[in-house]
Image (cartoon, rainbow, N blue to C red):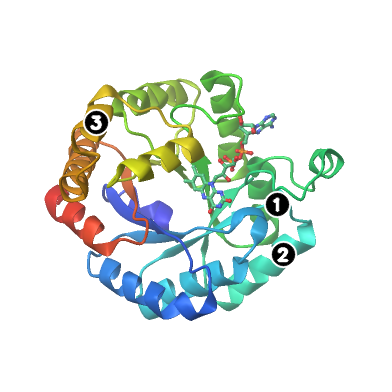
């Protein structure tokens, strides 16, 4: 199981997303073949918002696990799902031979009105974690946020709720992407102080264009340090130099995290094997 790896090594893992259309599956498999050459400890596969395309998540995770022989973590959100919906997905996972899931609440889908949101079957990711531990044999991971989740009142309250995921049976955590290592180190101190002992994989996304940074910051709420803002200001108009500088920034971030003894490095690969390879070759 993945949780055992943290006792042996600093892990290296990747996140990929499933294809949006069925006819893009071969392309996704091709991306994964290239990523598998980098010998990650595991690969996680995202889940469409609100549970859409869950079958493709399971299908791609199954390909990673059964054809590439790399442990796969299937993401799963619960905000718009009933308990039966979740058990349908876990049945699919079992049939596909999967053993690991990243249990998430997910963002409120646009189709949910206030009443539906208030009465959802799973209020929080910790409820999904508990449910999965009670009803399946899956190893469950959870998400955490070095700069706090956007709805949380404070980092302290977010960490209080993070501890509920540990108590519900989570095995390890993966962070939201961040660009400033100091905020990650502050988060580690606080979560240690709160008695959270599970391993934490640091989520790093290489920024290879100015446009990507804008979208990423909107979606993640991560803050942009001056050094990264300066890179965008200097190279933003020049795609090739921007790509190099963005990859270099991610490499420096990861080397510093490794030096500080991070439990694991999780690269948000954005299904880009070339970029991921450049980073992995520089950090190994
Ligand atoms: P929770 O842990 O439930 O937290 C959500 C909010 O509720 C936080 O503010 C927290 O402080 C608060 N809270 C938690 N418990 C309680 C409680 N008991 N009482 C009161 N408040 C509480 N989204 C997707 O749609 N698909 C994906 O594949 C996906 N992958 C992700 C991978 C990672 C590594 C991360 C970090 C995020 C991912 N997301 C994904 C985004 C995620 O779904 C959103 O950030 C979502 O808004 C929160 O999910 P969560 O599991 O962190 O929720």
Would you identify the image quadrant in which residue 224 lies?
Answer: top left
- Which callout, 3 or 2, points to the residue nearer the camera? 3
Pick whichever of labels 3 and 1 is earlier in the sequence: 1
Could you tell me which quadrant the N terminus lies in? Answer: bottom left
Which of these two is toward me, 258 or 214? 214
Q: Kindly identify the residue that appears in the image at 62 percent across and 46 percent down.
A: 106
Q: Kindly identify the residue that appears in the image at 26 percent across and 34 percent down.
A: 232
What separation in Å lies between label 3 and label 2 (alpha carbons)?
48 Å
Under circle 3, the secondary element is helix
Question: Where does label 3 land, which residue?
Answer: 233
Q: In the image, 130: left or right of 74?
A: right
Q: Kindly identify the residue that appears in the image at 25 percent across and 39 percent down.
A: 236
Dividing the image into four quarters, tell me where ligand 1 lies.
top right
Question: Where does label 1 land, which residue?
Answer: 131
Question: Where does label 2 land, which residue?
Answer: 87
Residue 36 appears in the rendering: yes
- Which callout, 1 or 2, points to the residue nearer the camera? 2
Which of these two is toward me, 10 or 184? 184
Cβ atoms at labels 1 and 2 below 8 Å apart? no
Residue 31, position as x, y percentages in the image: 33, 70
Residue 144 appears in the rendering: no
Q: In the image, 265: left or right of 23?
A: left
Pick whichever of labels 1 and 2 is earlier in the sequence: 2
Under circle 1, the secondary element is helix
Under circle 2, the secondary element is helix
Would you identify the image quadrant in which residue 64 lies?
Answer: bottom left
- The relative height of residue 178 versus residue 41 in the rendered view (above or below) is above
């Amino acid at each position: 199981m993945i949780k055992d790896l943290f006792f042996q090594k600093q892990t290296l893992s990747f996140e990929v997303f499933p294809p949006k259309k069925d006819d893009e599956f071969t392309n996704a498999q091709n991306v994964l073949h290239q990523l598998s050459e980098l010998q990650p400890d595991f690969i996680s596969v995202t889940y469409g918002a609100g549970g859409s395309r869950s079958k493709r998540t399971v299908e791609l995770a199954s390909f990673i696990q059964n054809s590439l022989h790399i442990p796969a973590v299937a993401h799963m959100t619960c905000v718009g799902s009933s308990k039966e919906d979740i058990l349908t997905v876990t049945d699919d996972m079992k049939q596909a031979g999967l053993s690991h899931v990243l249990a998430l609440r997910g963002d409120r889908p646009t189709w949910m009105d206030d009443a539906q949101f208030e009465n959802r079957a799973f209020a929080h990711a910790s409820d999904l974690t508990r449910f999965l531990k009670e009803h399946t044999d899956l190893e469950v991971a959870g998400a955490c946020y070095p700069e706090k989740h956007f709805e949380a009142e404070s980092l302290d309250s977010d960490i209080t709720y993070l501890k509920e995921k540990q108590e519900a049976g989570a095995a390890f955590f993966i962070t939201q992407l961040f660009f400033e290592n100091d905020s990650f180190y502050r988060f580690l101190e606080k979560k240690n102080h709160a008695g959270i002992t599970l391993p934490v994989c640091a989520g790093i996304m290489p920024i290879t264009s100015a446009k990507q940074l804008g979208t990423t910051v909107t979606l993640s709420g991560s803050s942009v340090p001056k050094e990264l803002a300066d890179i965008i200001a200097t190279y933003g108009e020049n795609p090739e130099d921007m790509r190099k500088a963005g990859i270099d920034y991610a490499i420096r971030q990861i080397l510093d995290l490794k030096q500080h003894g991070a439990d694991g490095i999780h690269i948000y690969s954005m299904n880009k094997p070339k970029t991921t390879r450049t980073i992995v070759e520089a950090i190994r």
